Image (spheres, grey):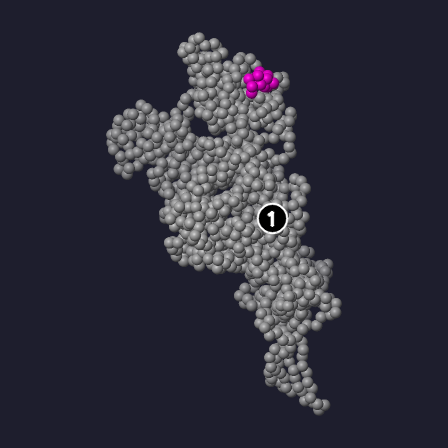
Amino acid sequence: MTHPANQPSDIAPQAKADQDLAVIFAKVLRGIAKAGPSYDGIEFTNGIPPDSTFGKWWVHLHNLLKSPQLVEWAEQNHIDLSKPISISLRDHIVFTTSSGRREMFTAADEDPLWPVVLAPILSAAKVVAAGNGPLLLTSSNPSSAPDEVVGNFYGEWPPGNASRAAELEQTQTFNKNAANAVSSNVESGPAGTYKLDLARTALGDLEDIHSLSEKLKGIARSGSSQIEEALKNTTLDINPHSTFGQRRDAGHSAPVTLEQLILANNWFLPKTIDELENLIRVINSPALPVPSLGSLGGAMSWPAPLENYDQKTIYSHFYYNLTLPALANDRTLRVDPRGALGYLTKNLHFSQSELRNPLRVIEKIVSPPKAVELEAALQQKMGDDWKTSSSHDWVLSAIATTLDPESMYHPKPNHVAGFNLADGRFNGQPLKTIKQALTTHLIKLNRASAEMAPIAAHLLLSRAAPELLVKDIPSGVTFGSAAWASLKAAVARIEAYSPGSTMQMTFAQVAARDSQDPISLSGHAIQEATSQPAIIEWGKVNGVLVPRDDENYPEIQIQRVKRALSEKTTTLQKTVEQLSTKVPTQRDVALEQLKQKFGVELPYEVKCFRDNSPHGRGPGNLASPTQPMYSLLDFYLSKPDIDQYSNWVSDNRQMPVSLIARLSELPDAKAKHEHAFAAYKTGVEDALLNLVKGQISALPLEDRQNLEFGKIRVFTEGEVTKSETSTPMGTLRDESRVPSQPKNQRALIFQTERDANLEFYEISTQQGQIKKRDDLKKNFKEGLQKEWVETPNHIGRKWKSTAIYEKEYSVHNADKQQLSPLPVTTPDSFNSPRSAYISELVANHGKAGYDFHELFELSKSVTTFDEVAAKEAQIFNIALGFIPGASSIRHLINGDVWAALGDLCFDGVMYLTGSAFGKGAGAAGGARGTRAASAASRQMGRGVLGKAPLTPGSSGRLATRVKTTNVRQLSQRSMDHAQLSDFAKRPDIAEGTYRAYAAPEPAKVTAIVDKKTGNWSQYDVIKNKAYGKKLDNFSPDVPHTLLKDGSRQTTTALTNTEKSLALDNVIQMKGTMKDLQLVANEMHIFVDTYKGVDRLNIVAHGAQHGPSISFLDRGSSIIIDNAVFSPKALVFLLQSKGINPATFNNVRLLVCHSGEGGSRSFGRLLQQEINRPVKAFEGTVSMQHGSTAITEARNDLIKQINQINPNLTAKKTEELANLRMQMDFIGVIEQKVVKDHGSTIKINVAELGEPARYIDDVISYRPIHFNR
């Protein structure tokens, strides 16, 4: 049967509810006019219709106050949400604490939950209050609101007289229709439905995430190993306004499982507890801050930065082409080297406290009228073809180009303003050293004053090396170290999502963020892309990768560097573990054996055994209080002789005497202890060897080259003695030529000779770093360093002095000390044979300083608790001496080996494992830094070290060469579930390709079309802004051609455009018609644009079939001129009218029931017929300008034309009517489909030619997409 397209009445449910509220509010106005305002000035409007514009926003605001995230935040901050809340319309909210104190919260507090929890409340309050504040809000009934709030919202406050109340009752129209919106364009107003939908969706998504998180935590707490099954079987409630709630099939009532929600967000399904806990951490992480100035580069920081030519254009405009008085230059004046920064700060003054916050200083520099004037002048010069994403883009670009013209004219990797950020002299130095050196460099170049130079350095580093701007970086994180590479990658990863955010973060916060593994394919791709530059730089600095001018490295080399970095880090981590390992004692070894044999609960050290024989008791028959008592541990270690007269008893029921006999079943504890101690000794010696290699690799490049390639001689410096003793046989003389050194000062001096230059290095396993002995360079002499000094001696005479003698070496090692014939490059100092030789010499020399024998003796068996404590202290003090540099802080660390290791171990490996974020982590950013540090107990640098557990399988062979990826643009295309939904709702935004001038290949970009000009510009997804020059050759993505079976011709992943077409809630016709053709009675087509490509919309009536359709294999059909048409017949009809559906990007069937019937539905069969994606509907379609309405309008025009000119032929009259219809609709009318599924609306159900007949009907909105 036919089913007329549902034609909504002229009044929408929201407008009707606004009318109802107008009547209610008119009574309020009448009451005020009659009795005057109340004593306290607060009266309430009750019974507010929830579907009214105000009602929707008022309910949403109350829902925000009930969100689980706000409730948790309030509990943590001791806030009482039952008390009134005062909301300023500027930037703050005042809550009442549980103690009754009023406390204000602002965005300036930098609370990580502000943008998630508090900012939405402030935003909604601004809409509700309509610019009148502050707004007092309670968590009371959302159907009641203060009269003043309702009146302000609709422009009815202050209240008028009784006549206004009568007028409002009669017209049912507020002064401001639909709340602050222009009546002709309600959607664009501050309280527009689109903005409300976005706000409600954001809240719904938050509630879904909270529900998911709580369910996942429950699975984690249960300790279940069947995680995948739990995800399949555990359900949760979904907020109907959330992205997922809107995507679900309309009318679908089946419960949603955790697995469904996780997969809908394109996240990995966790399979282990570690992966589950990682997912919980990620989804609960607060949003990254979004700095208003981004990474401080203006147009240079756009996702697709300015081309070099355009950078030079800005530079030239600033110096030569602007008409600003202070910048006038006739090319005869010398260019001011301080550029735009000097120009803008010329008369600005900053206090020392302000200068300690560079970001605030920069905000002040770009905000005054002088900066606004410069921005406008540059925009005028650049022209109307350019769009900016902020009001400071050109000013910041001018600052950047004039601070660093070298990067435009003579670009070099790792250089800014001609300064090498990767200079070899920085190797092994704290990262702050680089920023300080750059600051000095800028002062020398006169690019900035001494006061502004740190600010200038901040501006340059924000794009070139943002890792150097992270706060509270430990001194142990040095340039060239694994920790530096990990930090560099971590910062790049965060910056890809939120440029400029890491400048406001501490090291501990960055580490905590980076310790989270990606939970999606796009996240993994970003981690890989941001890790790669750090891996390459580490490889070049550490001599593992030979630099290339084109920076185009084969993939096999990248993988080799990654392995080398991982192996070095693993070695040093093992070194840390070996040095921090507790010295094995006989007691520990014996206790471990006892626990393995008899269990961990028994009190093995309690002295409960005594000999109850007469011999054991001594005189008398009773036990003596002085009678010796023994523990089971004593028996195991001491193995006392037990004769036949002994009668051992136990005073502890847990420890039966029978255990003594069973000790014979255990292995010899002393032998096991000897083996454990030998392993410990070997581990410490290996660790010291690796630490020396680490020391060498941490030296500046020139020093590494000296030790690697130069000729070396090895010396010992220390005390020497000589003596004379008179004997009857004559005088005996003795003089030592082997200098002696104290046990804690065992060191060797290495002399290097390279290019006729001598250098001296003191290396020791007992020092934290290698010491350069510049004091020996001037007047080095071998032998005695000063005169002999006589010392008192009991026999004969004795003298002492200080000497330096060369250490003897074997013939076998002679070649190892000669000048290297290899070319001087960046050496792989950690793994080279020369470093291994030096480390072995130093480690062997240092062994004499370690009391392993004394330590072994101390670790033997002990018999009383007092002795245990005393010996443990002695053992600790000796073992502490194994840690380089620790002897000097022995009395400061109070027995904490980890504290000793913290800043002394090389490559910052403590910060890669999270071990350093324990005691003292508060130094890394206060209380918030401590919380972040706690979360960083997992490994930092998982991208560069290859430890991410959820790495997706490879989709193909590795690329032969690796090219630099524009990570910002990659992150722009990496949309999550909610972002994809927003993308789908914006037909003016598209992804596609664009080839820049002289570019070797096209680039993938996201673009937005200007509705007025039709020009495409690049689009910043994060800022929701167009930017850059218009794209003259942008090609929007189109879905891949479909085969007859609906499959795609390619195996590549779905594009975002294809994904957006598949979203169930995307059918709104944003944008005007481009074409309109009336094909037949009650059937027309029109063309509109979606994401830059044309789509064909077919509007007609559909035939509703019974439930047996699929069994009878009849398929579905549409009705045209009361005749049934199949898909093939429809295509033939359209082609006969000059319309080929197969030439369009995709097709929309605005036809009732066109999606019903599964594989035999009209939509599916049409898709197979034209091989293009088709959108159809299950159930009815409610829309404006439906097939009947258009035909009615056309027929009315025919009548009018016939009345004016009755002599025209029917064909000519129809042509004129169609032409007038096209003039009225094309470029003017926006087709709108009503999609509030389940809502009630008035529908015109009259047949063609009948008078309008409206009934209340329930909206059906169930779109379905056929594309494969």
**Residue 1135 is inside the magenta segment:** yes
The quadrant the N terminus occupies is top right
| Residue in the image at 67% along x and 67% along y | 711
Is 931 left, or right, of 728 in this rendering? Answer: left
Give the magenta range.
1125-1139
Residue at the far top in the pictured view = 1207
Magenta stretch holds residue 1166 = no
Vertically, is 1013 above or below 577? above
Q: Residue at x 66, y 47 (%)?
A: 554
Q: Which of the 4 quarters of the picture holds residue 837?
A: bottom right
| Residue located beneath label 1 in the image | 532
Q: Residue at x 60, y 48 (%)?
A: 532
Task: Point out residue 1026 in the picture as x, y percentages from the top left corner.
Answer: 48, 38
The reply to whether residue 100 is visible in this rendering is no
Q: Quadrant of residue 118?
A: top left
Residue 108 drawn at (x, y percent) = 42, 48
Please state, as top left, top right, bottom left or bottom right, where the C terminus lies in the image.
top right
